[in-house]
Image (tube, grey):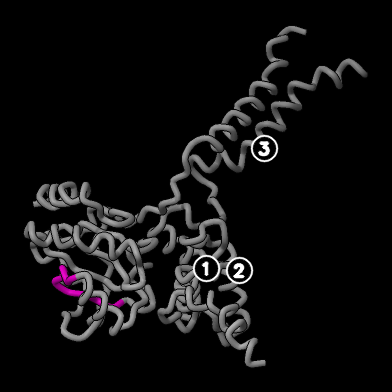
């Protein structure tokens, strides 16, 4: 046999595959599905107002020369309640936030805003989650940074916590 | 009987824990044209649900899967080709959303590794065949 070391190759390959499998068991799993729409223009949509007394939301309401946050939420979503004070903090810092209420009812949205405050400039109602699909969004809550020209710049998955507030303000500032 | 009513009500309580919003009409209604429905069904079995991840959107009861089924049926009935709809989903959620990896880039390795390993092992074992003859 000229190449005895070659006989070890299959074992080495098998060990590599086994090692990969073992690594897969140990490494913490990232279950977040990120949107592939980052860096692209907002898709076209026009949503009716989510409840009485709020303004409707369409894609042309954003990207009018001012960067904004687009917050995807729902009255039935518990982390959305947890992030409400941080949205208020962002609003207090001069950030304009547009909202999309997912799979919601007008009376439930009204009760949610009564209880947790209304930091939104406009709130559209996406009752069939069609816009959520267009955005590549995978759940509630999610927050997008929308640039001055209507480009989707950043996606934050999950509730906004106190430590995310300065980061989001920074992202908005760095766009202009 | 009157004793059982509260018990029955308690047993059905988990129903109230379900999401309460509306479900898109096309999510659970078949298309009128059976061939189009079959086309949509084939595609729905090969798209992954974003919410429950391991299941296809045809198998999943999650609200996100319902929305995705409605989108697939709407686009199919509008005459869209299944592969174009798959591309539409991939454009929004990345390659991850498809259960059928395509035949290019790093995914070539996924398809070709078994073939490469088979050829390599045949080459390694060639001496065994030679010695017998």
Task: Let me know if marks 2 and 3 both belong to one chain.
Answer: yes
Q: Earlier in the sequence, mark 2 or mark 3?
A: 2
**Residue A124 falls within the magenta-colored stretch:** yes
Pointer 2 residue: B42
Residues under numbered marks 2 and 1 in contact, where contact means CB atoms less than 8 Å apart: yes
Callout 3 environment at 10 Å: few (<14), some (14 to 19), or many (20+)?
A: few
Residue B34 x, y percent position in the rendering: 62, 83
Q: Earlier in the sequence, mark 2 or mark 1?
A: 2
Pointer 1 residue: B82
Q: Give the structural element (helix, strand or loop) at label 1.
A: helix
Residue A30 x, y percent position in the rendering: 44, 46
Q: Earlier in the sequence, mark 1 or mark 3?
A: 1
The magenta segment is A117-125
**Residue A165 falls within the magenta-colored stretch:** no
Quarter placement of the N terminus of chain B: bottom right
Residue A166 x, y percent position in the rendering: 15, 48
**Dominant secondary structure of the residues highlighted in magenta in the image:** strand
Give the distance between the C-alpha atoms of the residues marked 1 and 3, in whole angstroms.
Answer: 28 Å
| Residue A165 appears anywhere in the view | yes
Please give left or right for residue A104 compared with residue B81 in the image: left
Q: Does A6 sit above or below residue A59?
A: above
Q: Give the structural element (helix, strand or loop) at label 3.
A: helix
Quarter placement of the C terminus of chain B: top right
Q: Which mark is residue B114?
A: 3
């Amino acid at each position: 046999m000229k190449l005895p070391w070659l006989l070890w190759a299959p074992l080495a390959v098998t060990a590599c595959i086994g090692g990969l499998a073992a690594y897969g068991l140990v490494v913490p799993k990232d279950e977040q599905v990120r949107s592939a729409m980052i860096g692209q223009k907002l898709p076209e949509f026009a949503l009716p107002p989510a409840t009485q007394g709020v303004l409707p939301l369409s894609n042309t309401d954003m990207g009018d020369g001012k960067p904004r946050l687009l917050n995807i939420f729902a009255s039935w979503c518990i982390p959305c309640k947890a992030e409400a004070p941080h949205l208020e903090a962002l609003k207090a810092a001069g950030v304009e936030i547009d909202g999309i209420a997912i799979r919601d009812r007008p009376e439930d949205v009204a009760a949610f805003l009564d209880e947790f405050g209304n930091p939104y400039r406009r709130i559209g109602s996406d009752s069939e989650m069609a816009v959520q699909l267009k955005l590549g969004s995978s759940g509630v809550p999610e927050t997008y940074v929308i640039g001055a020209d209507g480009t989707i710049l950043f996606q934050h998955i999950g509730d906004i916590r106190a430590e995310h507030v300065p980061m989001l303000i920074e992202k908005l500032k760095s766009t202009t | 009987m009157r004793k059982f009513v509260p018990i029955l009500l308690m047993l059905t309580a988990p129903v109230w824990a379900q999401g309460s919003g509306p479900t898109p009409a096309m999510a659970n209604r078949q298309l009128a044209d059976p061939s189009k429905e079959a086309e949509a069904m084939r595609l729905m079995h090969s798209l992954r649900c974003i919410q429950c991840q391991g299941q296809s959107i045809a198998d999943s009861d999650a609200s996100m899967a319902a929305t995705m089924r409605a989108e697939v049926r709407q686009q199919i009935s509008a005459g869209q080709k299944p592969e174009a709809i798959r591309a539409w989903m991939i454009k929004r959620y990345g390659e991850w959303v498809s259960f059928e990896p395509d035949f290019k880039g790093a995914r070539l390795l996924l398809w070709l590794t078994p073939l490469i390993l088979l050829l390599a092992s045949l080459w390694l074992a060639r001496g065994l065949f030679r010695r017998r003859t």
